[in-house]
Amino acid sequence: MAKGKPYLQNGIRHECITPVTTLDLELGIRALADYQGKARYVPEGQPGGYRAAERVLKSMQPAEVIDAVKAAGLRGKGGAAFPAGLKWSFVPKDSPGPKYLVINADEGEPGTFKDRFIMEAAPHRLIEGAMIACYAFGGHDAYCYIRGEFYDSIRLLEDAVREAYTAGILGERPLGVDYPLHFQVHTGAGAYICGEETALLSSLMGERGHPRMKPPFPAVEGLWRRPTVINNVETVATVPAIFDAGVEWFKARGTEKSPGIKAVSVSGCVRNPGWWEIEYGVPMSVIINELAGGLMPGRRLKAIIPGGSSCPVLRADKADTPYDYESLAAAGSMLGSAAMIVLDDSVDMVRVMRNFCHFYTHESCGKCTPCREGTRWMLQIHERILCGGGRSEDIDLLHDITLGMDAKCFCPLGDAAAWPVKSAVERFREDYERWVEKSVVVAGGGESAMAEAS
Amino acid sequence: MALVDVRAAKLPDSIRQFISANIPRYPTPRAVLVPALMECQKYYGCVTPEVSAAVAAETGLPYAEVQSVVSFYAMLYERPLGKYFIGVCCTWNCEHAGARELMAHFEKKYGGRRGEVAGEGMFTIEYVECLCDCHNAPSVQVLKPGPEFSAAWCNNLTVELFDAMLGDLAAGTEDALRERLVRVEEKLNPPDERRWVWIVTTNNQYAAWAERKDGEWLVHDGQGKLVGVKERNPKLHAELQRALGS
């Protein structure tokens, strides 16, 4: 957390009122105050009005741009937290022919709702970030892959792209610089797996969204077998802030290893679920109590899923863990896509896990056997337990299945399905035992309707 | 599956224009396939084999390849749906907030099971996976396919609100999907001395401050989305006045 900086300043700035997006909060507010349901080009001269892109394109060398992003320590915000500057530097510089930037807006992780806001409230910030990123690694084309359900985001981003082309910000001579830059909005059609980078590339090329083996990594061989950088929306939208406000400004926020600001979505059993920007390192209990309004009256905290449904569940005693990558890893979970799901004592962990298993069963693409079969087995076992047919060995069986899935698939969906269940079995075994103990296998047990629902 | 007459279907001009305008933006024509199929889904409400065949003819791809893509993606339905498609999110946040009650209510009132056409062709309701609107759980997306496609969020729903919305849709009321007030809460940690409230509607949640001017409440939120609410949505304005008190 920033040295001596209050992370809760005056309510307007950090309290999300707002989809603030630019990560420079004041700039964000200004963009939003101007926002009335339609994307709007921020006029020249105003903060955020493509000033960063203009400066980068006109006065910086690509290598300098990459160095600045590396120095700022910007990490990928989609889940893997890979340093963005390093990723860009993997693109072979001497390779002739096109290189592509793909922006991953296939936001689908249960609990996450940050990229939507960025695209709806400050689409120009995303375009600006894409321009800088393309310039840095030598690409000319950016594709933004948005999940099909986000009709509003697609419309607003397309409007913004049109505005940018009309204003001469994108095109053959963007901002008067002889470096063609193009931006294409591409819609998906409802597949969580397409948030995985190689599956996303397959889908973008018009195929079924199946992941493939790495290497070759997309930075070397990606879209149409050309070098491709894939970044999350939030990562790309953060880039202009580094050049607007400076590397030092950026590094002064967050922790040493996780500098900067993160958009965190809080949902679940809190009074005011929503979307905030925080500096890395704020304790989770502060986010829950001061931003999200705390728990419902009379409830106690039971568990926190810190980074979306794919992350291991933490027990309530870890609530004071600082919200950054390293601290959460030490506590036994992950920051993931920063989608904090808060569970109180009214929640039964077995039901939560049944729901997650259902999600992953539905979303598994079926390419790798451990994931395709494992998700179904886990769902069936959860449903059996909830139907009153649980056996005591089922709990260990679930644990075994998760071990058989973890790191056995082409893409992380198998891991993502296994981790929450593994952690729930390990950390909330009493919930499973309660079900198994009272299990009597009665026909028409009370949970049948629940289990049948898909 | 029945044999498909590839010559039978012809895409409307809007989709043909979409395809021909977008193909040059990619190195290969195939890349336009998923967005083109989404346009068909929005236009027809489904992507039947005939529609797939027409897309195949338009893009120059083999029909089997198009069909392989259609069968993969969850948003592409291969059989016709009702006039309105109601996607009820069933992932945990929404399930916890009552998504199953909404579904049960629909099935009781309109008789159709999920996935079927119910209410005399008006509705098809279906569970969908996470819509990434978890802060507004339970979240429902209402789609109206056709040449004038429209999509609306209906969030923070209770069974009563859902019932009213369905009733208005079935009756063809113009503002059936208008933003309605769900509740107003005083904010627990107000950042300053103004009156801060959380306004929860069927469309969004707003952290806003309220001030009284000329005998009525004006609300200001950071997004500016409530600006001019009195003119745009008088019913919501009246509901807000009532909820904020005198």
Image (spheres, coloured by chain):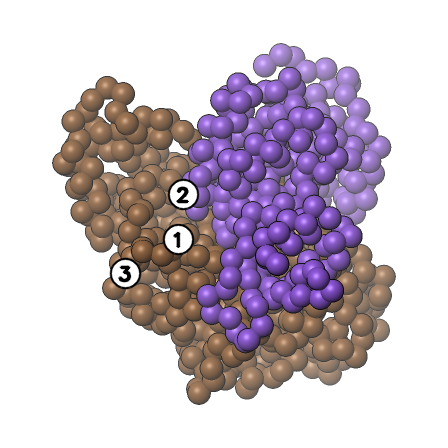
Chain colours: A brown, B purple
- Callout 2: SS: helix
- On-image quarter of the C terminus of chain B: bottom right
As drawn, A238 above or below A345: below
Q: Which numbered disc covers residue B96? A: 2
The disc labelled 1 sits on which kind of residue?
Cys
Residue A49 appears left or right of A334: right
Q: Classify residue A284 by image quadrant.
A: bottom left
Residue B216 appears left or right of A452: right
Measure the C-alpha gap from mark 3 to mark 1: 13 Å
Q: Residues within 10 Å of mark 3 (few under 14, many from 20)?
A: some
The disc labelled 3 sits on which kind of residue?
Ala
**What residue is pinned by disc 1?**
A269
Residue A188, position as x, y percentages in the image: 62, 43
Q: Which numbered disc covers residue A316? A: 3
Q: Which numbered disc covers residue A40? A: none
Q: Are marks 1 and 2 in contact (CB under 8 Å)?
A: yes
Q: Residues within 10 Å of mark 1 (few under 14, many from 20)?
A: many
Residue A364, position as x, y percentages in the image: 44, 39
Residue B127, position as x, y percentages in the image: 50, 33
Chain letter belonging to callout 1 = A
